[in-house]
Image (cartoon, helix red, strand yellow):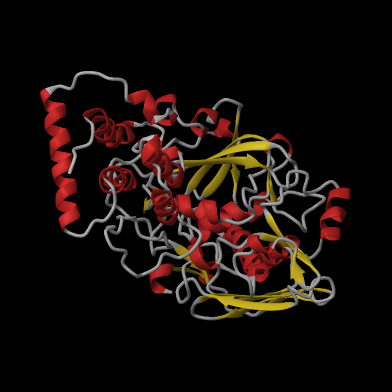
Amino acid sequence: MQLPKQSTLAAAAAQAVKTAACPSVRFCSRRKLQQSALKRSQTTQQRSRRQAVRALEAQADVEEPSTQKKRGRKKSSRPPLPSPAPYQQTVKNSFALGGLGLHTGEYANVLVMPAHADEGRYFVRVPLGTNSHLFSLEEDVVRDLEDDLEPEENTEEEDALQLELYYKFLQAQAEGFDGAFDEYIANEIGQPVIDSIPEEDIPEEILERMPEDMAVDADLDSVGEHPHARYCTTLGEGENRVQSVEHLLSALEACGVDNARIEIEGGPEVPIIDGSALSWAIDLHATGLVPAQALEPGKDSRTDKVTRHVLAPKKQLTVRRDDAFITFFPEGTQRLTYGIDESQEATIIGKQWMSWSPGEDHHYRWAIAPARSYHPSLQAIMTLRQQGMVRGGTDACAIVGYGDRWYEPQRVRFMDDEPVRHKMLDLIGDLSLLADKGHAGLPLGHVIAYKADHEMHVEFAKKLKASCGPADVVAVEKA
């Protein structure tokens, strides 16, 4: 067997070091970094169809991973799925996403950062240029591999590293690895480096919340008046207004992020991205959670855990509007049920019902987050645009009904019930506004909604909170 050229070995071996040293890793999507690492560790002649197919399969994030073990490929280490805990949590490190707002059409950058316990989730509008540098890979990260293949003499240390890597590759082949050397470098050397980044034990410094931040708390008191309140949830007013917060808040609430500083640069609207909460959930999974640090002086913030409380109303409550309603029933667990009826406009959607409990059913990342926004027909989209909405919507951020079929069926992720799953996503985001400074948003009990919208969600949440007293707030661990 012929040894690879030294220049190829040197470039491949250096890839892991470059990836680990990249200061912008934690602000970029893991999928993009993994694909970039694989691309740079292959020469143009080695990029065969077989390797490309394997790379795409390895990066499939929308479908739930198969439990079947693939020959020659070790299972990558990943942080556990983020979930609520009996104590308050925050993100381990900051992460960022950018894109167009669905209704305003303006571009915005969003940076989700750690926050102290009892600060809750809050938004801060920041000036242009504050975080925009985090949304592009540095030059030395995106350059092509051929830039690194210029002939140069290797040191003795580099020669030793090359041989060591190749001997490890030969040993892996003997143990069943059936890929090429460059694929071994990408998957067995570079990938563990990327996977290890979220596991760093170095906590990110938390910015202190200052009065001049003009922060907007993600709670019911901050819900502002908006002419399109049925179609999105808006917090704050004037220059501090933050629009369409429901998808981001849904992911934070369901994944257990009780405290977070959310900086928005550019437009006033949280980006729609692909119309779901999947991107937020993936980044939360990659980033991981840690116990939120206490603000009290003298406490060891790395070990102390602040108790998390939940609202546990003892009385039934119903909000109605025509044939739409939302009802709360006291119960010993958090449970949501949603129903929709689009039979008259889109038989492909028809009548759909779904019930979901975060403690009993599939994780939010798989069951709820991937569900996109939907419209029952093309005419419904045109009507919204005539009313000044969906100016930033693209064909990739919603699924559209077309009578007895989907307008673009390839975009549908849950063929039987994606619309009602998305309504569940919206409900979680709006009920998260019940959270009181770092505590749970979803109430302890059964919430049943039928043909509701964002305006009804918020109205219901306000009435539910008003019906409760201090005795209705209990510690999660005792609930």
**Which quadrant of the figure has residue 153?**
top left
Residue 118: x, y in percent? 46, 51
Residue 246: x, y in percent? 63, 55
**Which quadrant of the figure has residue 306?**
bottom left
**Residue nearest the viewer, comparing 160 with 315:** 160
Q: Residue at x 32, y 64 (%)?
A: 70
Classify residue 444 as left or right of residue 411.
left
Residue 26: x, y in percent? 40, 39
Q: Is residue 56 visible?
A: yes
In the picture as drawn, the residue positioned furthest to the front comes out as 1
Classify residue 166 as left or right of residue 250.
left
**Residue nearest the viewer, comparing 216 with 365:** 365
Classify residue 130 as left or right of residue 295.
right
Q: Residue at x 41, y 33 (%)?
A: 24
Q: Is residue 299 visible?
A: no
143 shown above or below 394: above
340 shown above or below 110: below
Classify residue 473 as left or right of residue 75.
right
Q: Quadrant of the C terminus?
A: bottom left
Residue 234: x, y in percent? 70, 49
